[in-house]
Amino acid sequence: MVDRDPQEIHALADVLHSSGETYRREGDFARAAEFFRKSLEIRERTRDAALIAAALADLAKVLVLLGDLDEATELARRSLAARSELEDPAALAE
C-alpha cells in the first residue's frame, strides 16, 4: 500500500468498514469483526482520528456480541481516547 493514492486507501478502508456493517446487520458477528479489523488496520495507517475512533467503536460493539468483553472494553477506551483528541465535542457523544 505504500505506492497507493491516499484517496484509494481511504476508499478501501470505507469498503471494508461497510462490509463489516453489512455482516453485523446480518448477524454474522465473527465475519463483521474480521472486516472491521481490516478497516481499522488501514485507518490506523492514515492517522485520521475520527475514522480510527469509528472503526474502534464498531469493532468493540461486535466483540461485545461475540462475548469478548475484555478486548471490547479496551477498544472502547481507545475509541474514546481518539475521539477526545478531536476538537469536535459532538464526536464524544457518538
Image (tube, grey):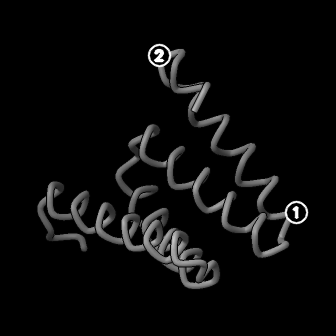
| 59 over 53 or under it: above or below | below
| 35 over 81 or under it: above or below | below
Q: Residue at x 39, y 42 (%)?
A: 48
**Is label 1 in a helix, a strand or a loop?**
helix
Please identify the quarter of the rendering in which residue 33 is found.
bottom right
Q: Residue at x 55, y 84 (%)?
A: 31
Question: In this figure, which residue is indicated by the disc labeled 1?
Answer: 70
Question: In this figure, which residue is indicated by the disc labeled 2?
Answer: 87
Residue 53: mark in rendering? none
**Residue 47 position in % (x across, y down):** 41, 46
Q: Residue at x 54, y 15 (%)?
A: 89
Cα–Cα gap, marks 1 and 2: 29 Å
Please identify the quarter of the rendering in which residue 22 is found.
bottom left
**Residue 85 position in % (x across, y down):** 55, 26
The residue under label 1 is which amino acid type? Answer: Asp
**Residue 38 position in % (x across, y down):** 46, 74
Counting residues from the start of the chain, the first of labels 1 and 2 encountered is 1
The residue under label 2 is which amino acid type? Answer: Glu
Q: Residue at x 54, y 76 (%)?
A: 32
Q: Kindly check if marks 1 and 2 are in contact, taking CB atoms under 8 A apart as contact.
A: no
In the foreground, 93 or 73: 93
Residue 65 located left or right of residue 91: right
Q: Residues within 10 Å of mark 2 (few under 14, many from 20)?
A: few
In the foreground, 82 or 18: 18
Q: Quadrant of the N terminus?
A: bottom left
Residue 78 located left or right of residue 85: right
Q: Residues within 10 Å of mark 1 (few under 14, many from 20)?
A: few
Q: Quadrant of the C terminus?
A: top right
**Is label 2 in a helix, a strand or a loop?**
loop
The count of marks equals 2
